[in-house]
Image (tube, rainbow, N blue to C red):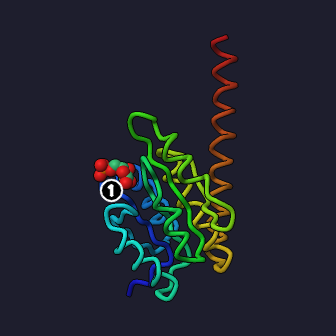
């Protein structure tokens, strides 16, 4: 029996999917149930609003919003809920994501959005940040997060060992 999803991912367009898949993968690895939708602050404002206004009662604990260009989705969603909202800005032409980054991060005081970086790293970090929020109320998930960090540290240390070997041999 599948558990109720705790995390929601709203993306402004299906074209955002290649980046958002990095978030799906993190949730899968951590065993976090999630729900994802294509919903836009501009193109489907009524649907986005309805989803967010019912999200808390449906048991969601965190919402990730993915949008490019005039990226209002995260801010508009945050305006309709007190759940934590994470904004993932998408890179697009002609400004390479600077437009979406500023639109996401530059929220007026009173309605915060936690903005992550553009691109693949942002997809991964948005989900990892959501995991850290969910882990506050879930010791098992907190353990998995600590384990993830320890493995990451071990990988970097091993990369450094390899580098030292390479430098000694070649230079
Ligand atoms: C935003 O506009 C979407 O999040 C997407 O990043 C961007 C372009 O959308 P498409 O024209 O690819 O549908 O709302």
Q: Nearer the viewer, residue 48 or 26?
A: 48
Q: Is residue 80 left or right of residue 165?
A: left
Q: Is residue 102 left or right of residue 139?
A: left
Quadrant in the picture for residue 128: bottom right
Image coordinates for residue 59, horizontal then vertical, percent: 50, 85
Q: Is residue 106 above or below residue 112?
A: above
Q: How packed is label 1: few (under 14 Cα within 10 Å), some, or many (20 or more)?
A: some
Farthest residue to the front: give it: 108
**Residue at figure coordinates x 64%, y 79% from the top left:** 138
Image coordinates for residue 40, horizontal then vertical, percent: 36, 63
**Residue at figure coordinates x 53%, y 63% from the top left:** 75
Q: Secondary structure at mark 1?
A: loop
- Whether label 1 lies within 8 Å of ligand 1 gets the answer yes
Q: Which residue has dot 1 on it?
A: 13
Quadrant in the picture for residue 171: top right
Image coordinates for residue 87, horizontal then vertical, percent: 53, 58
């Amino acid at each position: 029996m599948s558990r109720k999803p705790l995390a929601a991912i709203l993306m402004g367009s299906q074209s955002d999917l290649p980046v958002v898949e990095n978030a799906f993968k993190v949730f899968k690895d951590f065993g976090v149930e999630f729900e994802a939708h294509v919903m836009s602050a501009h193109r489907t404002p009524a649907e986005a609003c309805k989803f967010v206004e019912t999200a808390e009662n449906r048991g969601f604990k965190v919402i990730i919003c993915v949008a490019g260009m005039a990226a209002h989705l995260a801010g508009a969603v945050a305006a309709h809920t007190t759940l934590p909202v994470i904004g993932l800005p998408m890179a697009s032409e002609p400004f390479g994501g600077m437009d979406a980054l500023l639109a996401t991060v530059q929220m007026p005081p009173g309605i915060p959005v936690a903005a992550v970086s553009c691109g693949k790293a942002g997809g991964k970090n948005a989900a990892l940040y959501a995991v850290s929020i969910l882990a506050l109320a879930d010791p098992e998930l907190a353990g998995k997060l600590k384990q993830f960090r320890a493995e990451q540290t071990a990988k970097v240390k091993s990369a450094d060992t390899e580098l030292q070997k390479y430098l000694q041999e070649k230079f």
